[in-house]
Image (tube, grey):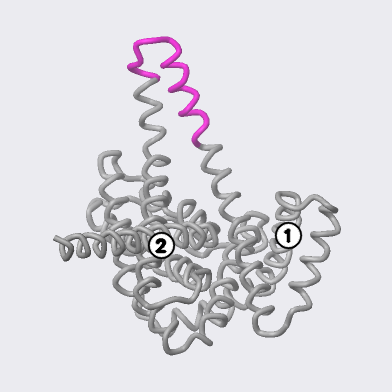
Amino acid sequence: MSGLLALLDDVAAIAKVAAASVDDIAGQAAKAGAKAAGAAIDDAAVTPKYVHGFAPERELPIIWRIARGSIINKLVFLLPAGLLLSSFAPWMIAPLLMLGGAYLCFEGAEKIAHALGWVSHAHQEAQIPDDPAHLEEERAKGAIKTDFILSAEIMTIALAAIPKSNIWMEAATLAAVAVMITVAVYGSVALIVKADDVGLHMAERGRFGLTRRLGEGIVRAMPGFLKLLTIVGTAAMLWVGGAIILHALNEMGLAAPYDWIKQTAYQIAGAKAGFLNWLATAVMDGVFGIALGLVLVPIGLKVITPLWQAVMPKGA
């Protein structure tokens, strides 16, 4: 009997350790996911364009296909690569973070430059051909390729934010971040894409006047909401990209820009820490991101893009 009680006591102790580990994984995943919020917002802002022009009944299947590709990107390719980096080449994480941050700054600044008419896109939006199934295939593949880049940024940022521990804890935390971010991004995308259809249904078939007016309001609000989402996504890219690079420079011993921003934010916030301090820091990180991005735009468009097109097969 005493042996059984001892066994039950051991099982209870193991269960407590497992529960604590689950709590640690959930907590670390939440913190790491918050660090990757900027790239995730950009992912949510970019994805709806891939279902534009398709029949309403094809929108959710396309989003599901992209989401499935996204989780494969994160769990099958990026998670093992991140663990290998963490175990055998941790020195590469900071340069990769800077590369991802530079890409975010470039993307954000390129969107601003395009909106202001400083740069133009040579390609036009593809029209729906007689074979929409072929276009659906191409759009989904293009979205999954774009997601791979954004997912790589998300996973690298998350990996850098996870406290150093054993490989299994890191793997579980990264997997939790991957699932959490994918569900949040593509669940939001599905809601955004279908919101106008829901609003139209409410406006046309609502039993009550309030329901119909609410549906009409949703339909009218969606174009403005999508523009706002694009603005927020661009701002988040610049803020997160600038912050990543400044933090990585600080970790590599070039602390002057990072320290100056922290000290200036503290002076602006005064004795009040918290939101005002964070806002001042985020704005200055974003300004740094815009400045760096504007430098990178001509390099990306005039040098890197032509080289990429020359090396990669057509349509890649």
Q: Residues within 10 Å of mark 1 (few under 14, many from 20)?
A: many
The residue sitting at 37% across, 46% down in the picture is 187
- Assign a secondary structure to mark 1: helix
State the image coordinates of residue 111 (x, y, percent, origin top left): 60, 59
Q: Out of 51 and 180, give the one closest to the viewer.
A: 180
Our reading of the magenta stretch's main secondary structure is helix
- Residue 126 vs residue 157: left or right? left
The structure residue drawn at horizontal position 78% and vertical position 78%, both measured from the top left corner, is: 256
Q: Name which quarter of the figure residue 210 lies in.
A: top left
Asked if the residue under mark 2 is in contact with the one under mark 1, i.e. CB atoms within 8 Å, the reply is: no
Q: Position of residue 166 (x, y in %)?
A: 40, 77
Q: Amino acid at mark 2?
A: Ile
Badge 2 marks a residue whose secondary structure is helix
- Can residue 293 be seen? yes
Extreme residue toward the front, this view: 2
* Residue 177 versus residue 164 in the image, above or below: above
Q: Range of the magenta residues?
A: 203-222
Q: Nearer the viewer, mark 1 or mark 2?
A: 2
Please tell me the numbered disc located at residue 194. none
Residue annotated with mark 1: 281
Point out the image quarter for the N terminus: bottom left
Q: Nearer the viewer, residue 103 or 136?
A: 103
Q: Amino acid at mark 1?
A: Thr
Q: Nearer the viewer, residue 294 or 238?
A: 238
Per the image, the residue denoted by label 2 is 25
Q: Earlier in the sequence, mark 1 or mark 2?
A: 2
Residue 235 screen position, x and y as percent? 63, 55
For the C terminus, which image quadrant? bottom left
Where in the figure is residue 92, as x and y percent of width and height? 51, 85
Q: Is residue 316 visible?
A: no
